[in-house]
Image: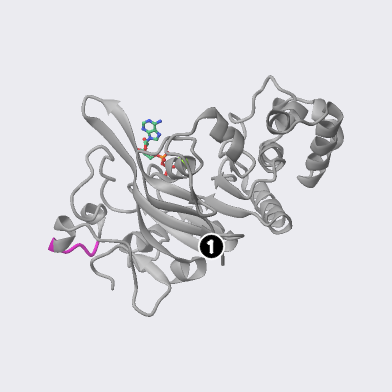
Amino acid sequence: MVDLIEARKLTRFFDLGGDQLVHAVDKVSLTIGEREIVGLVGESGSGKSTFGKTLLGLHDKTDGEVIFRGEALPQKYRPVDFQKLATKMQMIFQDPYSSLNPRMTVGEIIGEGLRLHFSLSPSDVKDQVVDWLEKVGLQADHMSRYPHEFSGGQRQRIGIARALILEPEFVVCDEPISALDVSVQAQVVNLLGELKETMGLTLLFIAHDLSMVRYVSDRMAVMYLGSLVELGKADEVYFNPKHPYTEVLIGSNPEPDPNIEKGRVSTSIQGEIPSPVNVPCGCRFANRCPKVLDVCRENTPELIPLKDEDRLVACHLVS
Ligand code: ADP
Ligand code: MG
């Protein structure tokens, strides 16, 4: 598989002032191959959205690099970089309610990128917008309506059309279905799957629901407090997790909470997530880990390959 995009020790901190630095994403390395779907999971606040946005240049990088088709992207994007890269990389946002401008018609929203990035006549833009409305299961006459006239699932289809009309190669889908009713989640996932196939897209699919991630992804990456703790084939990570955090996350811990549906992020993990402002020494999961050893509180485990397995794990207990 040809590499499409690679994060090399990608780091993004947020400066809150007064020595308060949020370690949202801390030295994350991940390579995504052409036409691959990598699922990214982890509890809320683990840095998934920040990682996705930093990959796309929507946040400046604090440190590290992003390589796209062998070329290092700028540390900080200038307007001309956004201009150049918008047609290569796009984002589909979590909340279809707040991510669409309520004062623009659906046609203006979907066509905006085309108008900004290509010199097309208004009628060419309109033709493409109509084409995309149909591709995402909406209708041509929806063009002149406003976002509030649509359901959540329809709005997410509008968000998908807006991102994909530019024919990007790489798309970050940031929890694209978590704001939707369960009944429409599968429809939107299936639509993304079809478009992925027909367009040859490469996706970073961020989600809360591990069973959904297993279903859509080739590989699964597990993030905790700004770091990757496990990475491997989606099925293998899901059915045979190696990191204690992944185990509790998918609810396969020895004392599963019967109230938690398997595959949903478990809220039964003991202890509090440490503050990303005061990241603990050693393994970041140590204070909550059911298998913690002394070494875990002292040395930070590296994300390293397991012997004889196509899996990376950052844990002193696993090798
Ligand atoms: P996730 O998407 O996994 O829920 P986020 O990437 O949104 O996690 O957040 C990771 C951490 O960074 C959280 O502690 C969050 O509060 C913090 N964070 C995110 N965005 C900002 C910001 N713009 N300013 C300050 N802190 C932020
Ligand atoms: Mg998020």
Question: What's under tag 1, amino acid-wise?
Answer: Arg
Res 256 visible: no
Question: The C terminus lies in which quarter of the figure?
Answer: bottom left
**Quadrant in which ligand 1 is drawn:** top left
Compared with 40, 145 (above or below) is above
Disc 1 secondary structure class:
helix
Q: Foreground residue, 36 or 241? A: 36
Q: Position of residue 96 (x, y in %)?
A: 62, 35
Q: Foreground residue, 7 or 52? A: 7
Q: Residue furthest top?
A: 103
Prevailing secondary structure of the magenta residues: loop
The residue at the point 70 percent across, 59 percent down is 197
**Left or right: 113 in relation to 140:** left
Residue 153 in the magenta stretch? The answer is no
The residue at the point 68 percent across, 32 percent down is 117
**Left or right: 168 in relation to 218:** right
Q: Position of residue 201 (x, y in %)?
A: 64, 54
Provide the residue span drawn in magenta: 290-294
The residue carrying mark 1 is 214
Compared with 205, 54 (above or below) is above
Residue 293 in the magenta stretch? The answer is yes
**Left or right: 137 in relation to 44:** right
The residue at the point 59 percent across, 31 percent down is 99
